[in-house]
Image: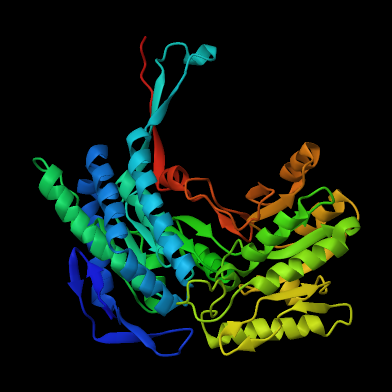
Amino acid sequence: MKHLLFIDGQWQESKTTAKILSPFTGDTAAESCQADDSQIEKAIAACVNATHPFSKTSRFLRSKLLMAIAQGLQESRAEIVNSMIQEAGKPWLLSDTEVTRAIQTFTWAAEEVKRFGGEVVPMDVDAGGRPFSEATCLFKPRGPILGITPFNFPLNLVAHKVAPALAVGCPILIKSAPQAPGGAALLAKIFEKAAKSVNAEHGAGREAIPMAALQVLACSNPQAEILVKDPRLPTVSFTGSPGVGFRIQGSAIGKKVILELGGNAGVIVHEDADLSRAAARCAFGGMSYAGQTCISVQRIFVHEKVAAEFEKLLTAEVGKVKHGDPSQKDVIVGPVIDSKAAERIEAWIQEAKQDPRTKVLAGGTRNKNVVAPTLLLNPPSQSKISCEEVFGPVITLSTYKTFQEAIVQVNDSKFGLQAGVFTRDSDRIHQAFENLEVGGVLVNEVPTFRADHMPYGGVKQSGLGREGLKYAMEEFCERRILVQYRG
């Protein structure tokens, strides 16, 4: 398959293409056209030209568009799933689930746009405000958005930028992930068909969805930097590594930047927890898609009173995880994205093993790009496997004496995306919620859980801003207030 560029409502080829290699077989899975400077300029100009007409479209029309995209995703499910398996090495079950989530993302956006209004602000709360009527505060679209997306969710993380942008009437230009651009390219095809259908059925007078409301292209890193710096794209929404994210923030002077970055999610398993459930969920949360999720379970802290029992349960659960060919429907751990990532993960495991206190309870090996599900007991707290984002199928297990000590251990990280707490004690739940330095706390669930409509984001080096339909829509808008003197 050859992925073309979707610019100003047209499919374009380019002089330069890049091969997309299957992480599992190493064979060529697809080719991706790489935009040149003139195509970059055309895409930016098209976004600008679409801004005014798109911002003036009705919520009715935009809701119809979003529902048509959701339907198109369902119709293209098999093709999208195959693309993710081949390009990203994502196991079949997880790829199929991702399509379902993307359908929900667009469906919820279609509903949210109907109630996304504003608020009335009372003005007569002090003497100076008495002569004024109540103020009206509305959300107004900020204009063109640059969305930069990663390989690990090649469809749904694109959807989390595209759906809220289309909902509020902001044109969006997606720079797709170089390792797995197929999800974004297929979404552009679905958008094209949906926009034409909605315009034909529901367009009235001058109201129509501009075909430049969504543009998708692949390009080099220097060209991506041009996009980031261009003042005509006032909002940048990036999902990826902290290093790249904060460089983007430094380059996007005068812009609004939303960053969804990395993590090394911690889980607390207290002595009163349902240990069987905790072990099963932690194994899945740490190993799913070879751990290539920013909220993948990485560090588990278990109370010393139940440590021996939980260690046995968790070791058994990790041992059950099927790994290998991502096209097989029972495989949960496929390959990591490339050989560089596999070699790095293996090196980090070896580094931790140098400490005599560290034990390998499961895994610790690799076959080409497939790293076996790995469980490490008591790795050094300053080892890379503990304090960096492993982004691989590796879980660490340590003990604690008091619940407060466990909170300190989870917080001992430069990241703060989500954390999990397994306990039946409501006081400890509130203690965790008040004191854990993260964007979200999951109770009796792993931090790998995300519902696509909830506010999602982190603190510290895990990012800035929030995603989730309503919250991303707010990020893509500015509040504008109308205050009227009534005398």
Location of residue 287 with respect to 200 vertically, above or below: below
Residue shown at 75% from the left, 39% from the top: 430
Along the line of sight, the residue nearer the viewer: 268 or 380: 268
- Give the total of numbered labels: 0
Give left or right: position of 282 versus 67: right
Residue shown at 30% from the left, 85% from the top: 17
Q: Quadrant of the N terminus?
A: bottom left
Residue 280: percent from left, percent from top: 68, 61
Quarter assignment of residue 64:
top left
Along the line of sight, the residue nearer the viewer: 75 or 337: 75
Q: Residue furthest top?
A: 487
Residue 459: percent from left, percent from top: 63, 54
Residue shown at 55% from the left, 53% from the top: 450
Give left or right: position of 320 versus 197: right
Give left or right: position of 142 versus 399: left
Q: Quadrant of the C terminus?
A: top left
Residue shown at 57% from the left, 90% from the top: 368
- Is residue 103 in view? yes
Along the line of sight, the residue nearer the viewer: 269 or 168: 269
- Is residue 387 in view? no
